[in-house]
Image: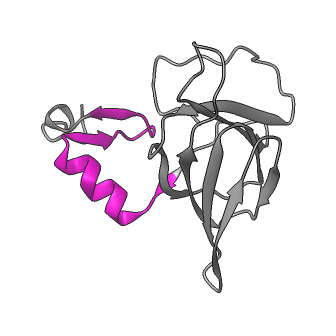
């Protein structure tokens, strides 16, 4: 799920899924996005709000430690840490969410229009391969570059 072109997966063989650990402080998370694959979320620490919009129905589900949620394929979703879990000094003030996506390929996210606009205002865009790049670099690129 990474949009960092330098990110390398630890497992390179096809294994039917990809996963990411999301660590956040209260108020942080992942903005509104979707992708066509299946997705399962498991809260490790903290209390999370997961907003899901399938087009016909919008709901917000709260997840606490060890709660698991299956997100429908293609649904718009966002994750926000509501409350961090008390814990060891290294983990105090943080929440953790395990995000598992089905499939063997790279999970490419489609961001909601308001997220794309905010990123553009902050000087960031996605390049043709779906990786984050500085906007000033891509505005000068042409089709024959």
- x then y, percent, for residue 56: 64, 86
Residue placed at 58% from the left, 13% from the top?
A: 89
Nearest the viewer among 99 and 134 is 99
Position of residue 111 relative to residue 61, above or below, is: above
Residue placed at 72% from the left, 53% from the top?
A: 63
80 relative position to 141: left or right: right
Residue placed at 18% from the left, 40% from the top?
A: 123
Nearest the viewer among 57 and 112 is 57
**Image quarter (top left, top right, bottom left or bottom right) of the C terminus:** top left
Position of residue 78 relative to residue 24, above or below, is: below
**In magenta stretch: residue 64:** no
**In magenta stretch: residue 126:** yes
Tell me where the magenta segment starts and ends, as one range.
110-133
Nearest the viewer among 112 and 94 is 94
- Count the numbered circles shown: 0
- x then y, percent, for residue 112: 43, 62
**Image quarter (top left, top right, bottom left or bottom right) of the N terminus:** top right
Nearest the viewer among 97 and 128 is 97
Position of residue 31 relative to residue 10, above or below, is: below
Q: Which residue in the rendered view is the most extreme toward the front?
A: 86
119 relative position to 48: left or right: left
Residue placed at 74% from the left, 48% from the top?
A: 64
């Amino acid at each position: 799920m990474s949009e960092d072109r330098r990110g390398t997966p630890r497992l390179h063989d096809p294994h039917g899924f990809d996963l990411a650990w999301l660590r956040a402080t209260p108020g942080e998370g992942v903005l509104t996005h979707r992708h066509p694959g299946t997705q399962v979320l498991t809260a490790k620490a903290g209390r999370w709000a997961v907003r899901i919009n399938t087009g016909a129905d919008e709901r917000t589900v709260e997840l606490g430690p060890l709660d698991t949620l299956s997100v429908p394929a293609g649904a718009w979703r966002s994750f926000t840490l509501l409350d961090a879990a008390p814990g060891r000094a290294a983990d105090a003030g943080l929440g953790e969410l395990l995000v598992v996506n089905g499939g063997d390929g790279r999970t490419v996210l489609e961001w909601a229009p308001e997220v794309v606009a905010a990123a553009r205002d902050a000087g960031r865009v996605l390049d043709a391969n779906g990786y984050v790049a500085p906007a000033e670099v891509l505005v000068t690129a042409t089709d024959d570059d």
